[in-house]
Amino acid sequence: MADSKRYISKTELETHKKPDDLWISIQGKIYDVTQWSHHHPGGPLPLLNLAGQDATDAFIAYHPSIAWQYLDKFFTGYYLEGYLVSDVSKDYRKLAVEFSKMGLFDKKGHGTCILLTIIALLFFTCVYGVLCCDKTWVHLCCGGLMGFLWIQSGWIGHDSGHYTVMSDKNLNRLAQLLTGNCLAGISMGWWKWTHNAHHIACNSLDFDPDLQHMPFFTVSSKFFNSITSAFYGRKLNFDSLTRLLVSYQHWTFYPVMCVARINLFAQSIILLLSKRKVPNKGQEIFGILVFWTWYPLLVSFLPNWYERVMFVVVSFAVTGIQHVQFCLNHFSSSVYVGPPNVEHHLFPRLPRCHLRTISPFVKELCKKHNLAYNCASFWKANAMTIETLKSAALQARVLTNAVPKNLVWEAVNTHG
């Protein structure tokens, strides 16, 4: 009996990768997600980045099993011609099913409750130290505690953006707003927008916003050609100012990380004031206003300008440790130019408390398929990152090609 299924080729599928014509393949079936992209909880960008290709592994990584039942409404009736699954993808999908059966995606432990308690204690300790003590060293210690508080709130914001860390979605959203917007001054809407794009296009120089830090940093000489950012929709100009700053980036990396918080504040405000659609925008703006009410007010209670400035500097510098850590994970890794075709983070929905549990399974998968499994200590990762920055810096110094005139606006539109 002849096969009654209708097929389209991989080449034809690749033509459907525009915002108004967006198709993807999942397990060999073709889905039209053009309209859904406007309502997708992760935003339209992940779908656009994966448009016109197989997105099965990314779908498995990002969605719980309940999501499969909603796919049929987007089915076009077409199947992908010659659809095959690689051996490594087969084993990855088996692992995902096994971890799901073990309940690892649902068992979150008590880490979030413990962390929220620590954050509350840190906050009230800072407030008490500023309001009730008159010693300078106490005020400086409170600044350090504030920075440590922001680090911990950052982890809750990160985890709650990947999976539900609380007992239900409403409490999860409340935890996001409190720890992200209200306590840390960072829009969770901005974080989701950039972080989802980062996960789908991890270490793609033109698609991953977490590598697009010009004019301050570049991790590859490919940026010297002023590549166009698919995320920002504009050219990243490698101008004379960028060349100067990049030439010394291995020296300026840590000092910039000490004040990188300022850029996250700016990026949050810029997004919320823009015309871009942001889910729950009113809540996001309210949370940011709460932060910019209590934090300046707390600083104003310090006795003099010296202590006020030092409190802010210390709090920014301490939380800079987290900014460094985020960079270490990717700055020294291999990079490429072009759209993504694999999901980099295997299990982004997995609670952090289980990462050590699954590590042996992932190592075994990598060993079976001759894939590199890199694991570096914090200090080794720092050394690797500085070496990557130094390599690009030295190449920038000897660059002989003319560079365009400075566009200072680039500095306002970088983040990290």
Image (cartoon, rainbow, N blue to C red):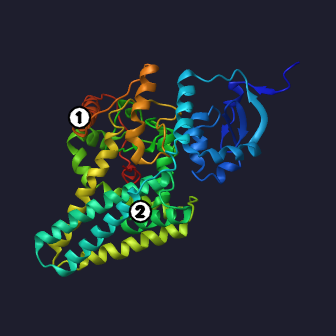
Identify which residue, 215 or 141, lies in the foreground. Answer: 141
Task: In this rendered view, identify the residue nearer to me: 264 or 2.
Answer: 2
Residue with the most extreme right position:
1
Reading the image, the residue beneath label 1 is: 380
Residue 133 vertical placement versus 413 (above, below): below
> How crowded is the residue under tag 1: few (<14 C-alpha within 10 Å), some, or many (20+)?
few
331 and 171: which is toward the camera: 171
Task: Please report the residue visible at 47 percent of the width from the left and 59 percent of the height from the top.
Answer: 188
Gap between marks 1 and 2, in whole Å? 30 Å
Is 56 situated left or right of 237 in this image? right
Q: Which residue is mark 2?
A: 180
- Could you say where residue 171 lies in the image, as x and y percent from the top left? 51, 65
Residue located 33% across and 58% down the image: 152
Residue at point 40%, 52% (across, down): 409
Above or below for 137 versus 329: below
Looking at the picture, how far across and down is residue 70, in whole percent?
A: 71, 47
